[in-house]
Image (tube, rainbow, N blue to C red):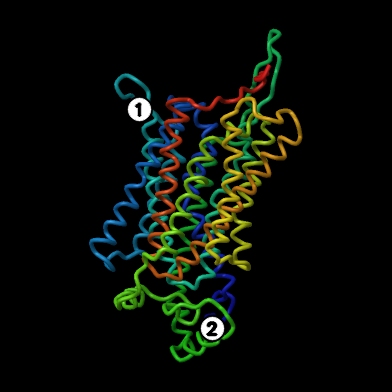
Amino acid sequence: MSGGWWSSAAVTHGLMALFAMGSWISVNCLWVELPVVVSVLPEGWNLPAYLSVLIAFGNLGPIAVTITHHCAPGRLNERLLIHCIQLLAVVVSAFLAVFWSHTVTIAGEERSLPFLLFTFMLSLVCCTSNVTFLPFMFRYPPQYIRTFFIGQGLSALFPCIVALGQGVGKVECKTVNGTVQPEYLKESFPAQNFFWFLFVMLSISAISFLALTQRQPTSQQDTPQQESGTAAGAAKENGEETHPLHNGGTPVSEDQVQVEEQPPVPTFWTLRNVYLLLLLGVSNALTNGVLPSVQSFFCLPYGTMAFHLSVVLGNIANPLACFVAMFVLLRSSSGLGIMSLAGGVFAAYLMALAVLSPCPPLLGSHAGVALVVISCIMFTGLFSYLKVVIGTLLHEAGHAALLWCGISIQAGSLIGALIMFPLVSVYHVFSRSQECVENCS
């Protein structure tokens, strides 16, 4: 069986994508299901603010992992840690599906303590995944990290599709006593079923990672050392990406990684690597923190159809851009800078629309809808491609580089969210468009 389909590269790519899908699917599911749960839980529309704070506290996980790497280098068993956080996510998601609507009385007021507690634990898992999953990828050849980012893109796409099938956010305008009022349509299935979907997805991710780890010893036994040297030489002649830790294109073991890390290596902190980390941090601040916080402000004035198209097509652009990176990899530092500037132009346009909400330009025209949807697609696609390319380049710089890659992603996302939280939730800089009301009369 070792020489059959189970040992093929296609199976490895598939398992890798499913494993990576579990990295941020929990938080993505919580966000897309918010319109449903806010109508049940006592916090109401204050819940997004609570969710943002709990995700910020989830960064305690990456901080703990980073301190451990610094104080006890080589002592952290990443594979065991990944198994633990995946098991925690699966168990917590099951409890979430059962107890999400339960409340407790605190200081005389009803609070959704179980939901908030489970949200924090899932946020802790998601945040920690950035500094555990990515360093683990060092055991695989560079092309697999692109598949990993495709899987991360699916972690946003799948919940979005299921939520659309559920009918989240559907509204009809009805005239009652001479006044037009919005009526929110009932969902196709309850939030409990959606959270069971999350449980299934997390279970698939955990099983996929288990399958990946179980395949490692077999693949190494099937690839003798003599063959690996020949394969590496042939790969270099053919221009393929190779790395000294890659045993003939197969993943290496934990012990091999630690042994290889001991000899002195050139410093990671070169000007180019710092530049790549800064690009990565800024791009994730925009994609994971800034723009998601104001998406409803720059989309909803153009209608719910524009909002749904922006969300769905933007989430499709993410894995599609990662797939393109499998075949076309831009290594030029100046090229990456130009690409980030292009993505920044689309981000600036969307931010301008959010600031001008509820009366942005081209309101009520097809051109306005087309521009906002295309901008969302281009913004997400460009920065998704940028993230994959930088991840691949940092993969070639070593195991520590992938750890810093995960730290930059998480730090950028956190900074973006912290910047936008007071602007949106405290100072109310942005004005939301109201359904079934003429906002610009």
Query: Residue most toward the bottom?
Result: 226
Q: Which residue is at a point 58% across and 65% down the rendered structure image?
A: 330
In the picture, measured across the screen, residue 339 lies left or right of residue 428, that is: right
Q: In this view, does 49 lie above or below 147?
A: above
User: Label 2 amino acid?
Assistant: Lys
In the picture, measured across the screen, residue 338 lies left or right of residue 424, that is: right
Task: Give the Cα distance between marks 2 and 1.
Answer: 62 Å
Residue 96: image x %, image y %? 43, 41
Q: Is residue 317 above or below residue 178?
A: below
Residue 155: image x %, image y %? 54, 51
Residue 326: image x %, image y %? 60, 66
Q: Mark 1 points at which residue?
A: 104
Q: Name the residue under label 2.
A: 236
Residue 149: image x %, image y %? 53, 59
Query: Residue most toward the right?
Result: 366
Res 87 seen here: no
Circle 1 packing at 10 Å, graded few (<14), some (14-19), many (20+), is few
Give the SS element for disc 1. strand
Circle nearer the N terminus (2, 1): 1
| Quarter the C terminus occupies | top right
In the picture, measured across the screen, residue 51 lies left or right of residue 316, that is: left
Which of discs 2 and 1 lies nearer the camera? The answer is 2
Give the SS element for disc 2. helix
Q: In this view, does 209 lie above or below 159?
A: below
| Quarter the N terminus occupies | bottom right
Q: In this view, does 348 lie above or below 74?
A: above
Res 247 seen here: yes
In the picture, measured across the screen, residue 418 lies left or right of residue 288, that is: left
User: Label 1 amino acid?
Assistant: Val
Of residues 231 and 164, the one nearer the viewer is 231
Of residues 129 and 238, the one nearer the viewer is 238
Query: Residue most toward the left?
Result: 71
